[in-house]
Image: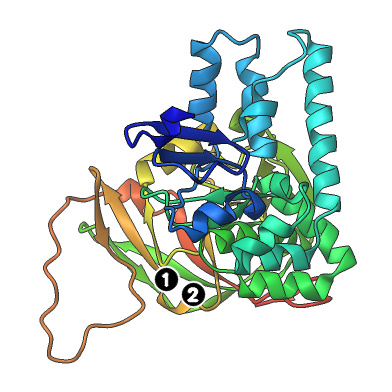
Amino acid sequence: MAELMNPDTWYIADAMPPELKTKAHVVLITSPKRSTYKELEKRGARMLHMPPWSLEELQDCRSKLGLPVSEAFVKKCFEYGGGVARPSLLQSGGAAAAFDEDVDRLLGQLGRAVDTTSVSQVRAALADVAAQDRGPEASHRVIHIMTDGSYSVRQLVFASRWVAERFMAKAAVEDEQGLVSLVNGSTGTFRGLMHEAWMHRTLPKGGEFTIAPVKLTGGTMKLVREADCTLKLPPCKEAVFEEVVELAGGRCEEGVYYKPASARFPLVDSLLHVGGVVNLFQMTVDLNKPVDFAALEGLLGDLGLTSQQEARLIFVVPEDIYPNFELTMKTDGSRQKQASPTAPALGSAPAAVPELGPAPALVTRPKLCIMRAPRAQVGVRALSA
């Protein structure tokens, strides 16, 4: 074709190796299958990664194209399978029975994909992009490619929290040693998902955990990390909730580990009411986290907790991060470093702390703690950390 010899032409190839005897600008759009793009890569082509769709993008597409798909169905598909357009934007019909059937069909497909993906395949994919390319097609339902603003940095993550937890439950039976190695050796965004999924398995088993209370002092809103102590949690049942209103008005039962159905639930990753205290857990692998007391007060109000009822917000961090983990105060859109475990050097002048005014309601609503999550181990049923 004469057009391919025109340097002003843009030649777009879809999921197939392009013709390379051309002067046109070549754009290849393909799944991560190296056999499709390897020749173009050899010629120095710039590789960009398209991340999964966000929930907002899926809903926007559904709305603007007038697709016969409910908003609830798109949300449910996103929660289970991540931001993949095809299953999220195809629904059999509007009836409740069809909705349930379509969700069950999606869960069946995802479940089969997880069941055919091994720990060794996941580890290989994390280590080398070519290894993921060589993996079974099912693995692409389990592992998604994320990227940064440049679209050139490739990071792998589980498709969703549901997929991560299903994979972890399967691997714990089939290859527990491999799973433990994967949890302890993961990094970056993938580590965050593994850490959260592992703690969702660990905390309901109960045990003794090391925590450091963090208190709000005086009228300056200064957070101070205190000495380590031990928190004992009993083994408990597990339950899933859709909306926080389901737990309000005394419906948050003692001894039940509650987990939101959606990983996008704000502020906390799980709740446990034990010993008269409502424990709110937030799992993180970050080196610091902001505390939004105003939003937390709203959550406690939605739970129907009175000012006399004790609540704790517990940041659960890996043991290598725990010694230096810091909380920051979020006030009026700004963050001020607080709760540092490291004292200032001798002879150094203390940093000036801006006067933010008294906030007595923040002292106990809720109490703050940092929990040390122990390294994953084989065969551990109840933990001491």
Does residue 120 lie above or below 190 as drawn? below
Total tally of numbered discs in the picture: 2
* Mark carried by residue 322: 2
Circle 1: is it few (<14), some (14-19), or many (20+) Cα within 10 Å? many
- Nearest the eye: 145 or 214: 145
The three-letter amino acid code for the residue at tag 2 is: Tyr
Q: What percent of the width, then of the height, locates residue 326?
A: 37, 68
Of all residues, the one furthest to the right in this rendering is: 174
The three-letter amino acid code for the residue at tag 1 is: Phe
What kind of element bears circle 1?
A: loop
Q: Real-space Cα distance between discs 2 and 1?
A: 5 Å
Residue at image position (49%, 47%) is: 49
Residue at which label 1 appears: 325
Residue 292 is left or right of residue 237, and the answer is left
What kind of element bears circle 2?
A: helix
Residue 193 is left or right of residue 376, and the answer is left
